[in-house]
Amino acid sequence: MIVFDGVSFSYGSRRVLRDVHLSVGFHERVAVLGGSGEGKTTILRLILGLIKPDEGRILIEGDDITAKREEELRDVRMKFSIVFQEGALFDSLDVKENVAYCLREYTSMSEEEIDSRVREILGSVGVEQAIHLMPEELSGGMHRRVSIARSLALGTPKMFLYDEPTTGLDPVNADNICRLIADLSKDGRGFIMVTHKVSDALKVADRFIFLKDGSLLFDGDSRGLLHTDAPEIRMFIEEIGHQGQGC
């Protein structure tokens, strides 16, 4: 269980989260929606301890991580598989070496074991054929899949965190990434997916959170989201969510 207990956060003088109270189970499939600058990605960074709240507490499985030092956060972060929007692959390393990087850094696996593990992971996300390609040679969809593969290298996470996983992708690749997200959560592992693409969120999520002016304006299922009377959400859905085909 992830718990935000009265969490507020600001970037300088700009408040992006205001007294947020939120609980998410590791099995849940959650989409966090909202416009740019509304704090969606900030929620992911707070969960991982990459930034600290100005006020309130964050608990992961009952463990208060709010004041933990960097060296104390590794075990917390190992509970999650995180894919940020930019993917952040090493440009100087091919696909195999990108996925193998953490295995070499944090395990005592032999080269044969690393090779086998890398191929297994790449196969599980459908890009084993790209094993010797450089990041610059990958399509947008393949790049996103390799980023997901690298996030899986160190083990089996309890939950996936996705930051705008389909942004910038054409409809076919967006659909493929959505299918992968759904497939990876079939064994009971949930996800938190930050996105501004409502059409994508509706295909994979069961619970929807809408952020506006730093607060949770909506928290519920798809029916409640699509039939809300809140003008801010209706405008968002009509002007943004229905434009793209997505998945």
Image (spheres, grey):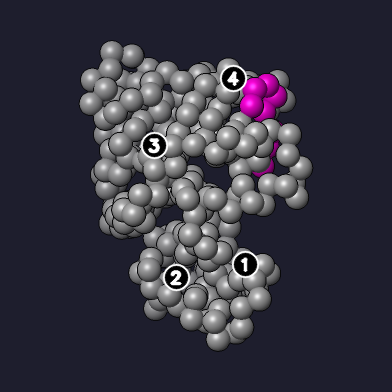
Q: Three-letter amino acid code at disc 3?
A: Ala
**Dot 1 corresponds to which residue?**
102
Q: CA distance from mark 2 to mark 1?
A: 13 Å
Q: Position of residue 182 (x, y in %)?
A: 31, 51
The image quarter containing residue 144 is bottom left
Q: Earlier in the sequence, mark 1 or mark 3?
A: 3
Give 241 or 129, whichever is nearer the viewer: 129
Residue 215 bears which disc, if any? none
Residue 121 bears which disc, if any? 2
Residue extent of the magenta highlight: 50-57
Instruction: Determine whether 201 is above or below 168 in the image.
Output: above
Q: Earlier in the sequence, mark 3 or mark 2?
A: 3
Left or right of 81, for residue 185: left
Q: Position of residue 204 (x, y in %)?
A: 30, 44
Q: Three-letter amino acid code at disc 4?
A: Gly
Q: Give the secondary structure at mark 4.
A: strand
Residue at 43 percent of width and 75 percent of height: 120
Residue 31 bears which disc, if any? 3
Q: Earlier in the sequence, mark 4 or mark 1?
A: 4
**Dot 4 corresponds to which residue?**
6
